[in-house]
């Protein structure tokens, strides 16, 4: 099977690429290596993939419709895993126009080209942030998700709706996966697990909002990749599916896990929770279990041990 993976040099993308190659698929990877975080880190993520003759890399921008059309014409992917995006909730408040350009227009380009070029299945990365500060706990996919707290989740909800349009009009099989706080080796340096691990390791302060009372549904990268590949193979008509661990962790307890693993105490400052942040994320994963056989197994303690092992090797 020939699979296109956009954002394939990123955290989730590179793990997806490696998993596809390991099972024998051909992979067409698209990434623009932008400087939201170090392009060098992204290139290092592809170290294993670059050794495979089944891996094809294009350094291209999904906003460039003509270039994307050229790649679709050359490579003729059978399925698409669309992970490319401008990520980061708080950063999207600073650069809302950029987030709209990349996330909405870029996704629309890919949906249009997928429909034109006969792609069988389009898997789209969405986010738990679309639920905002919903009081419907745990978060279920039938939640209207119409009150996002920042431009980033608003763009992702827009992409889910565009995917439905292309399914309705052209029969394109589309599944939007709402990821819940993904972490693990190769994790992005702007995300909490990396930021806290780095700061505590170096004896620097961490920012723990609202005295650490918020809760997050941390989900290990290997569990997420299992869900992504199961979705790719399922060829569902049109679905929105949560991929989480369904075991929210109090943020102060999360810090304690890192402290124990590093044998160091955190220096903590605790401002109020920003307007962009919900007090809780909590995935109902019954739909993923039913449709995908999804079964997350990594505890936060085990997942963070593996993340910190990777981090310490990188920092050495």
Image (cartoon, helix red, strand yellow):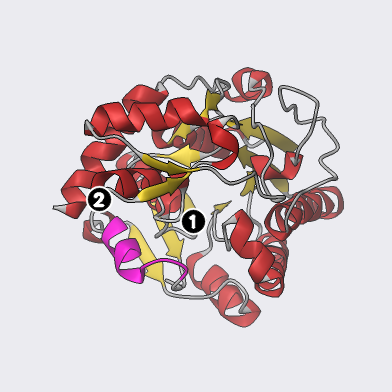
- With respect to residue 290, does 224 lie above or below? below
Between the residue at mark 2 and the residue at mark 1, the CA separation in whole angstroms equals 35 Å
Q: Is residue 54 magenta?
A: no
Q: Residue under circle 2?
A: 202
Whether residue 228 appears in this view of the structure is yes
Secondary structure of the residue carrying numbered label 2: helix
Is 38 covered by the magenta stretch? yes
Measuring from the top left, give residue 172's x and y in whole percent. Answer: 73, 50
Judging depth in this view, the residue of 55 and 178 nearest the camera is 178
Q: Does residue 16 sit above or below 296 in this rendering?
A: below
Residue in view at x 48 percent, y 39 percent? 182
Range shown magenta: 36-45
Please say whether residue 25 is visible from this viewpoint.
Answer: no
Apparent side of residue 307 relative to residue 172 in the rendered image (left or right): left
Q: Which residue is located at x 80 percent, y 28 percent?
A: 135
Tag 2–tag 1 contact (CB < 8 Å) = no
Q: Quadrant of residue 68?
A: bottom right
The percent position of residue 86, horizontal first and vertical second, equals 58, 63
Between discs 2 and 1, the one toward the N terminus: 1
Q: Which residue is mark 1?
A: 5
Q: Residues within 10 Å of mark 1 (few under 14, many from 20)?
A: many
């Amino acid at each position: 099977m020939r699979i296109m993976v956009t954002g394939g040099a990123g955290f989730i993308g590179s793990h997806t690429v490696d998993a596809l190659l390991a099972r024998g698929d051909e992979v067409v990877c698209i990434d623009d290596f932008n400087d939201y975080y170090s392009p060098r880190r992204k290139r290092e993520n592809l170290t294993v993939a670059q050794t495979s003759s089944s891996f094809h890399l294009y350094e291209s921008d999904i906003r460039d419709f003509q270039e994307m059309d050229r790649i679709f014409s050359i490579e003729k992917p059978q399925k698409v895993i669309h992970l490319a995006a401008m990520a980061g909730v708080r950063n999207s408040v600073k650069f809302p126009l950029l987030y709209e350009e990349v996330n909405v227009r870029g996704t629309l380009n890919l949906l249009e080209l997928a429909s034109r070029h006969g792609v069988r299945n389009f898997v789209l990365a969405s986010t738990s942030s679309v639920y905002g500060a919903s009081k419907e706990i745990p978060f279920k996919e039938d939640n209207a998700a119409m009150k996002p707290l920042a431009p980033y989740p608003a763009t992702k909800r827009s992409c889910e709706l565009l995917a439905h349009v292309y399914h309705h009009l052209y029969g394109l099989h589309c599944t939007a996966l709402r990821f819940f706080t993904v972490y693990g080796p190769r994790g992005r340096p702007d995300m909490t697990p990396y930021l806290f691990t780095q700061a505590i390791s170096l004896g620097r302060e961490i920012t723990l909002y609202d005295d650490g009372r918020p809760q997050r549904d941390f989900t290990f990268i290997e569990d997420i990749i299992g869900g992504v590949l199961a979705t790719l193979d399922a060829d569902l008509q049109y679905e929105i599916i949560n991929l989480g661990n369904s075991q929210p962790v109090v943020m102060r307890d999360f810090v304690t896990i890192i402290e124990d693993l590093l044998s160091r105490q955190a220096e903590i400052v605790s401002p109020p929770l920003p307007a962009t942040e919900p007090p809780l994320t909590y995935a109902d994963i019954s739909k993923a279990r039913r449709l995908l056989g999804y079964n997350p197994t990594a505890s936060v303690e085990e997942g963070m041990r593996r993340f910190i092992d990777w981090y310490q090797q990188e920092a050495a």
